[in-house]
Image (cartoon, rainbow, N blue to C red):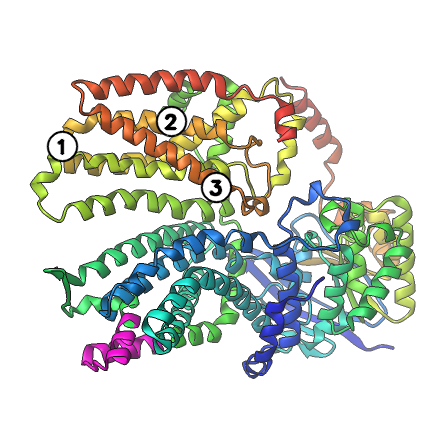
Amino acid sequence: MQDYRTLKLLDHFERVFNSFGVDYKVMRKLLQVKLTMDGRRVPTIFSQNAKKENKEKNNQYIKSLWVYVLFGLFLIPFVLMGDNYLFQMSLFYGIFTFFVMTSMISDFSSVLLDIRDRNILFPKPVSRKTISTAKMVHVTIYLSFLTIALAGIPLIVGLFKNGPLFFLLAAVNIILIDLLVVGLTALIYLSILRFFDGEKLKDIINYVQIGLSLMIMVGYQLLIRSFEFIDLTVSFQPKWWQVFIFPMWYGANMEMLLKGAFEPVYLLFSALSLLIPILSIWIYMKFTGTFEQSLQKLAYQGKAKVTKQNKAGQILLNIICRSPEERAFFRFAGRMMKNERDFKLKAYPSLGFSIVIPFIFIINTLREDFAQLSDSKSYITIYFSLIIIPTIMILLKHSGKYKGAFIYRVAPLKSLKPVFSGTIKAFIIKLYLPVYFMLSALFLFLFGAGILPNLIAVFISACLYAVICFMVLKKALPFSESFDEYSQNGNSAIIFGLMLFVALLAGLHFASTFLPYGIYLYLGICSIGLVISWRLAFNVTWEKIIKG
Amino acid sequence: MEDVILEISDLRKNYGPKSVLNGVSFQVKRGEIIGYIGPNGAGKSTTVKIMLGIEDDYSGQVNIFGRDISDGDIEYKRKIGYVPEIAEVYDNLTGQEYLTFVGELYGLDSGFASDKAKSLMELFGVGEVYHSRIASYSKGMRQKLLIISSLLHNPELLFFDEPINGLDANSVMIFKEIMAQLAVQGKTIFYSSHIMDVVEKISSRIILLHDGRIAADGTFDELKQQNTEGSLEQIFNQLTGFSEHKELGARFVSVVREM
């Protein structure tokens, strides 16, 4: 195992950790092992000859950071804009928090909620505090990489534009935000783990993840609303609810210290900005034992409920899936999506986003008039709900228990067609349809019944898009690969490319609305496209899967 | 030699409304090999997990090396080795890395742990995969790795939960010999398994758990005297009140034939 530079850096804080009652030496070992394993998120089955393992592969996560560097570039304008620090830096921190928090929920939740450690480490003479601190530090290490990737370049730009004090303050603020995000997430999980049990606990965790994603979105909107644009100058009106928009605390810090504007509101914000992160970390440290202990609840299945076969559902299923094999895979995939924690941890937050994003766009255009809305074509924004499709199509190939996939090869399957078509149907009906219905109901309310044909066209496009995604993506049997492979590179580029397809579909749809009866033309073309692609897409042979 | 290593009194544990252990009490003395047996779901693994601090929220007392384990001091774990029933390991690591890591957790020097693990792996016939990823191991190799990882730090007390799962007949013989030798050295072994004839041969004392209670406790000879049956398997059937295996087997096959 190689030694890591990060750990050498951490060695400087040995005393701090020890003073908290953490066995630093052991923690370092744990971290070294974790980092080594992270660096190996390569399918082990394909790299069995371990002899040439001298050069460790670079960590895949680090490789994926360039995307964040790119996002970071979008932050530069906020630094350059002017010297209304409260406004521009609040936005800066707001966007920063958005990225950090989302990645915390989707990528690091699995680290925080890992229960494997329990079985391996608890029998060993390692204190629980050390284990959970190692977990925290593990997350923090990646979070710092993410932070540097995201905020590094904008801060350096700020250093040249606004001077070293700005740079220093911004850096401290960002560290505080990181602490706050880690502390808050851990505390939220802690409280759920404390109060819920068994199956319910797992459901609640997913709801909380969706809820958090929504809150970030709403919070971001409120942040912008805090400022009024009058004649191109920005003015700030203090309101009570702004206390909860924490990026503003940090914006206030900048305004206060860089411009010497010591107003009472700023002082309050500034105090909060320091106190809350430290407090949340402190509370977490205090209850860290409880956290680890409560984690075991995740390992238990609650009392088993006998699920009744629903008659209507049965008939519907017979219509949707013709062949019995397809029905079997439809049910199987539906249950896997419903029950597998790893899958839900990764998929549900993005489902939440796909509901919110269309509205954010509508709200942004809705500055003027509510009456105008029903005449507008803003309903096209519902296409944003399609962008989750590629991500989930990729996720469907993975499972925490991927080794169970041997069953496909053992079973006497004549063709793989029902495997794939059943799974995709299950995805569309069990995951996408609820999102779609929710959005449609709200859109019908906002835009009136006249958009019904448009909404139907959107659904057909979504199905077509799912099939296109399937054709483009690398084929693998559903639930047959480890999640370790999921985080590998390559995916983000493909997903990005596939998103352009959404733009294409939305563009065609939009264009068709200018023709008389154009929407029906679009609907017809999409339907034909769907039928043809559905026929072609699933003729996948075993050879194709083995070769990849 | 008569010192008590392990003492459990009135141990109870439930998962929600379901109670797993209903007042289990026993003592284990130094050098004993305890065969801890019972039907599936009787609470064997739960008992072991409580003793190792993997499970909490129990009632009753567990003393190991004369100290109550719930006092928050984890030092007692230094002298314990454990082979879990379900083999969870960090299988992205190689055997060498994992074993060295485990050794270090018990306070061994890393170079020493690595050398020691290597010779143990070689003696157990799996030396050639020492530097391979654990994910590529066969079931038997994994099991050997787990056994070695439980012994690296020369523990006083060993918990083996189904340790011979997946081992071939020859390896089982080596393992039985290892246990006998360890007991001669004064190590205490707490062994649970479903393979009755192995338990019968190696245990110095047998504890049978049934429905979260102790149904029998004594040497094999004592059990034989109390029960009329001959082999441990038969005693097991008798004590757990099970005699319908023939009938159930026949019914099972008849259902299999339904098409």
Please, what is the three-letter code of the amino acid marked with disc 1?
A: Gly
On residue A448, the disc is 1
* Residue A169 horizontal/vertical position (percent): 36, 76
Given residues A544 and B54, the one toward you in this image is A544
Q: CA distance from mark 1 to mark 2?
A: 24 Å
Please, what is the three-letter code of the amino acid marked with disc 3?
A: Ala
**Figure quadrant of residue A2:** bottom right
* Residue B220 horizontal/vertical position (percent): 86, 56
* Residue B110 horizontal/vertical position (percent): 77, 70
Q: Is residue B36 visible?
A: no
- In the rendered image, residues at marks 2 and 3 fall on the same chain: yes
Horizontal side of residue B131 vs A114, given as left or right: right
* CB within 8 Å, label 2 to label 3: no
Query: Could you tell which of marks 1 and 2 lies nearer the N-terminus?
Result: 1
Magenta-span inclusion, residue A272: yes
Residue at (58%, 62%) from the top-left corner?
B13
Given residues A329 and B94, the one toward you in this image is B94
Residue at (67%, 27%) from the top-left corner?
A410
How many neighbours does mark 2 have within 10 angstroms: few (below 14), some (14-19), or many (20 or more)? many
| Range of residues picked out in magenta | A250-274
Q: Is residue A481 above or below residue A70?
A: above
Element type at marker 1? Answer: loop
Magenta-span inclusion, residue A509: no
Please, what is the three-letter code of the amino acid marked with disc 2?
A: Cys
Element type at marker 2? Answer: helix
Query: Could you tell which of marks 1 and 3 lies nearer the N-terminus?
Result: 1
Q: Which residue is mark 3?
A: A493
Majority secondary structure in the magenta region: helix
Q: Which residue is mark 2?
A: A463
